[in-house]
């Protein structure tokens, strides 16, 4: 196998509930130009391939966005593909880019993700559109939406393990707290457990402040071989080398009912983590991983994730989260960016934003108030739907 | 680089204007089960990865179909990704599968494509939905649809090179003729040049019989390493080895107007072909390729394709096609399956059906009336939109 891909540079826009004056392509161009600059390139001439990540064809009424973006950013006639995998789509695009480089198909690949979910769509309509990522034949007709599925899962977790609403409120508080130290974050907030507990019910036990956001935004990462980066990037030698050292992907049933009675956790996430750990030679994740971005689409999902990723034993997530173990000053800080709850969730960009947060943590160049001192290895966790598909990626510093 | 991927087996449904009694997942299951049997496997236990190809989220009101299909065909918890690239989506999925195997991410990968375009959608609505693969911001608002864009391009070809309507009518006649020897074909027909010329105008110079079809159908290919196939397939040793030896991908502007005045041909296709030829060590395509499936979305597009693929010089496509050079008894038979005009065009399955036709030609197991004697190397050609993105794949027999 060839040497692992490296991160050459990153770029992103501010994440907002609506970028009213910017089209999807405007956002992408901003992220790509920022990535070109950060990568220490003068232009995109040497970059060989593109991969596009977006999810919501129905929000944006646009297919084949990859071709549009190549057109807009001046990458014609170079190859492009669009990868789609629900909420995991950005992480899946990075995984696919890993395969492109490792296969020899190219030595450099620009992975860009974007979404405009806020374009005047009500949260009711948004829920209906997101439900197209559930099983349209069997679940939509009975009114199944993700909020209700997630609520059922965390309710099962509460009954099985004694997890409490206050425990997952801790996630809602901490991630919005972390977002205060991230300039691009959509919802930086200093709130209390009580604020979460008294916010209005959405789908019990989830309340408004337990739920993540509809967001507009774009993000971009340039991956390459070590040789390509040395040859083309003016910045590469000036910061620690970050390798894309592991990737895993798992699937599970679409229908939650088909997993009954085992609906407390995400098996696809366990599968993805095991693959990624195996590839990156990780045997003791809680000690070998220094920082992680987890898919906190709802606050309780982070509790389920820390279990599925092997950071704590099954059922211990609630206690661990409430103990502060995953806070900025804890043993394994997670969602230092603010996560989906605080930074925001522009679907196609989310997995890429997570990888950017990890990379910038390993480069030690994030705001000092959220920097994890001496971080050498980080993880990103995303999934589609209620983890019918899940992707875990690992990045590590090598110097 | 590792040894090239091989085709282990193939499966497909009949292609029809509507499979009224079969859902999208029913069609996929039929194609996958046929592929399992053809691959000489008892089940999917040993297969490591899936890739899903479909295009029309809006026709089918379903996202993340990959997860649904893994669920339905029993491939949980194995990894899956969905690849989307307009009309090229099936070929793009095969290209991405190539990268998965060559990267070492897996040794075996099931690539399945499907579409239900016929589900009670009028051709007017279909044109509007397909237009979402054009530039929705700039082209849809002025009523731009693919038929009109393609008509403008072939009109430019006629003015530049003297190409005639009778010449592209030859394609419409020949491909429907070939479809008569393909059991799964949607529109096998014995028609005349005069039938095409007198069919009703759609977008001049294209008439009804110059246009390809709306189709329901599914197709599946199992790719693997040579070692995996030897270890797992009971059929592998019994037929010629077919290698997936080349893949290329190119992009072009979304807006036809941005290519003006050079709108006679498809530059993205030229780019894709050059990459694929380089990878497969092809220097003289017309002599080194024995059989090809070309993207005949409209009859004249085949004339443009034989030029862009280097089978004939620029401007010579019309004369060459009319001479019979690409007929079943010609030097380089193309669209032996019947092509999009005769076999049908279930979008997500189209590129996969093309690869299946080439593979079965190289295996020498198609109907003798369309078998190309001694075929050793074949090509597939697809594109998205008016070739804003294009993929060319090469398969060759090794024995």
Image (spheres, coloured by chain):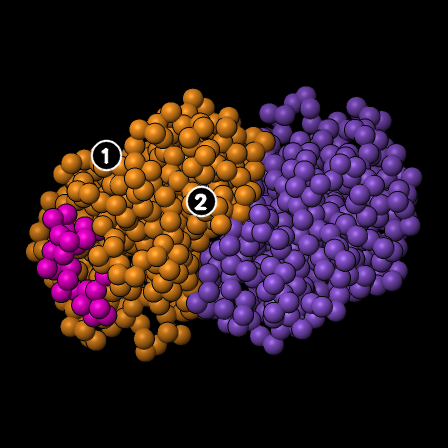
Chain colours: A orange, B purple
Q: Is residue B257 left or right of residue A245?
A: right
Which image quarter holds the C terminus of chain A? top left
Q: Residue B372: give x, y in percent of width and height.
A: 85, 54
Q: Secondary structure at mark 2?
A: loop
Asked if residue B350 is positioned above or below residue B160 in the image, the reply reads below
Q: Residue at x 11, y 56 (%)?
A: A324
Asked if residue B372 is positioned above or below residue A158 in the image, the reply reads above
Give the quarter of the image for residue A355.
top left
Asked if residue A11 is positioned above or below residue B221 in the image, the reply reads above
Chain letter belonging to callout 1:
A
Q: Which residues are drawn in magenta?
A: A311-334
Q: Residue at x 36, y 54 (%)?
A: A280
Q: Residue at x 53, y 39 (%)?
A: A106
Q: From this viewpoint, is residue B241 visible?
A: yes
Q: Residue B184: give x, y in percent of width and height.
A: 75, 63
Q: Secondary structure at mark 1?
A: loop
Q: Which mark is residue A69?
A: none
Residue at the spot of label 1: A365
The rendered magenta stretch, by its main secondary structure, is classed as loop
Specify whether residue A316 is painted magenta.
Answer: yes
Residue at the spot of label 2: A3
User: Residues under labels 2 and 1: Cα distance?
Assistant: 25 Å
Specify whether residue B128 is painted magenta.
Answer: no
Q: Residue at x 14, y 47 (%)?
A: A328
Q: Is residue A393 left or right of residue A64?
A: left
Q: Is residue A126 left or right of residue A196?
A: right
Asked if labels 1 and 2 touch by Cβ distance under 8 angstroms, the answer is no
Q: Residue A96: give x, y in percent of width and height.
A: 47, 49
Circle nearer the viewer, 2 or 1:
2
Of all residues, the one furthest to the front in this rendering is A399
């Amino acid at each position: 196998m060839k040497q692992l891909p490296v991160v050459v540079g990153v770029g992103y826009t501010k994440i907002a509930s609506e970028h009213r004056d910017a089209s999807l392509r405007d956002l992408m161009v901003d992220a790509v130009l920022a990535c070109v600059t950060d990568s220490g390139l003068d232009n995109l001439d040497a970059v060989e391939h593109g991969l596009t990540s977006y999810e919501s064809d129905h929000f944006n009424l646009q297919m084949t966005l990859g071709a549009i973006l190549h057109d807009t950013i001046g990458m014609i006639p170079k190859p492009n593909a669009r990868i789609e995998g629900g909420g995991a789509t950005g992480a899946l695009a990075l995984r696919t880019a890993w395969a492109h480089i490792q296969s020899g198909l190219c030595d450099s690949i620009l992975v860009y993700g974007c979404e405009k979910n806020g374009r005047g769509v009500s949260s009711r309509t948004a829920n209906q559109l997101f439900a197209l990522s559930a099983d349209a034949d069997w679940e939509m007709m009975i009114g199944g939406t993700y909020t209700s599925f997630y609520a059922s899962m965390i309710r099962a977790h509460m009954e099985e393990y004694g997890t409490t609403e206050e425990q997952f409120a801790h996630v809602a508080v901490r991630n919005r707290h972390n977002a205060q130290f991230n300039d691009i974050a959509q919802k930086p907030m200093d709130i209390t457990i009580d604020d979460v507990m008294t916010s209005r019910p959405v789908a019990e036990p989830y309340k408004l402040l337990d739920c993540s956001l509809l967001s507009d935004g774009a993000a971009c990462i340039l991956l390459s071989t070590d040789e390509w980066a040395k040859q083309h990037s003016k910045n590469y030698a000036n910061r620690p080398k970050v390798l894309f050292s592991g990737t895993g992907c798992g699937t599970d049933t679409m229908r939650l009912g088909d997993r009954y009675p085992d609906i407390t956790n995400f098996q696809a996430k366990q599968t993805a983590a095991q693959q990624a750990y195996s590839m990156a030679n990780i045997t003791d994740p809680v000690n070998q991983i220094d920082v992680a971005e987890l898919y906190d689409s709802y606050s309780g999902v982070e509790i389920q994730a820390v279990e599925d990723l092997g950071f704590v034993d099954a059922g211990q997530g609630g206690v661990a989260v409430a103990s502060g173990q995953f806070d900025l000053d804890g043993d394994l800080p997670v969602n230092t960016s603010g996560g989906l709850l605080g930074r925001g969730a522009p679907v196609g960009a989310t997995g890429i934003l997570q990888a950017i947060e990890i990379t910038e943590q390993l480069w030690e160049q994030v705001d000092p108030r959220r920097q994890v001192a001496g971080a050498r290895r980080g993880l990103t966790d995303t999934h589609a739907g209620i983890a019918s598909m899940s992707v875990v990626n690992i990045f590590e510093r090598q110097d």
